[in-house]
Amino acid sequence: MKIFIGSTTMKEKLRKESRIGRVLSDHKKHIGMKLYEGEEWIFDNGAWGHYKNGKEFDVNEFKNWLDAAYEKLPIPYFAVAPDIVAGGNKSLELSMSWIDKLPKDWPWYLAIQDNMDSANIIEALSSFKGIFLGGSSDFKKHAGYWCKIAHLHQKKFHYARCGTIAKIIHATIIQADSMDTTYPVYEKGRFYSFVQSLSQNIFDELIVFERSHRGEGNLIQVKP
């Protein structure tokens, strides 16, 4: 499983970890950033940052970020189509309205979240390369279902904002193709426990030993 983080400092300490890449979401902060050789990255549309600051999705800022990233950076592992955080079906409508305007050579993922119509999501999948699982913690409990839906339609599945070890493990158990986390970024204790988990291949071990839980929405707390 690919792991993506939001910290350049942490990535510097983990340069040998080929499984780890970075999420880039801000034109002003990230466009001058240099990727390491062979490093994967995710193009985030910036909607979450606007939402946290009480702002609506900024179309012009998104266009500037997309144009700059498309010109200066390699093709991302995937890119998140425009969405509205906590927007339900309106978010799905926005994503669909953009899909024909986005670069065809980039793999675009559909962001899904609370209060979206499941049938409409499944119908929309033909226009995207994968599912980007957003939404609340309660919505993420259904990650196993959406991972299976994605794989059934030959799409990839990304578990977004794995803010706890429990969610990181959950993403692994359901066999998500990738996930992103800021869990190790803010505290040294978290960072070193995360590094220890990687060195012990704890995530791969759980795929082997916890198969019975896949798709049931269980969050399993594991002490590193």
Image (cartoon, rainbow, N blue to C red):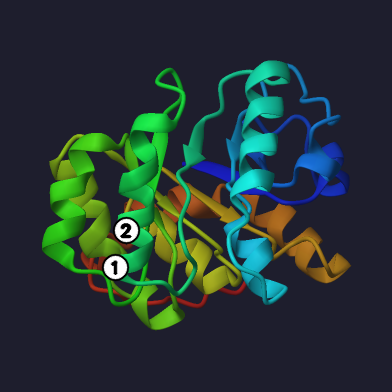
Residue 141 appears left or right of 196: left
Quarter of the picture holding the C terminus: bottom right
Instruction: Verify CB contact (< 8 Å) between mark 1 and mark 2.
Output: yes
x and y percentages locating residue 105 in the rendered image: 43, 17
Residue that appears at 84% across and 42% down: 28
Q: Is residue 98 above or below residue 167?
A: above
Q: Is residue 34 above or below residue 169?
A: above
Residue toward you, 124 or 75: 124
Circle 1: element type: helix
Residue 92: mark:
2
Would you name the residue on which mark 1 appears? 89
Q: Is residue 15 above or below residue 7?
A: above
* Residue lying furthest bottom: 138
Circle 2: element type: helix
x and y percentages locating residue 69 in the rendered image: 68, 27
Amino acid type at mark 1? Asn
Q: Residues within 10 Å of mark 2 (few under 14, many from 20)?
A: many
Residue toward you, 36 or 23: 23
Residue that appears at 61% across and 69% down: 163
Q: Is residue 55 above or below residue 195?
A: below
Amino acid type at mark 2? Leu
* Residue 121 visible in image: yes
x and y percentages locating residue 41 in the rendered image: 62, 33
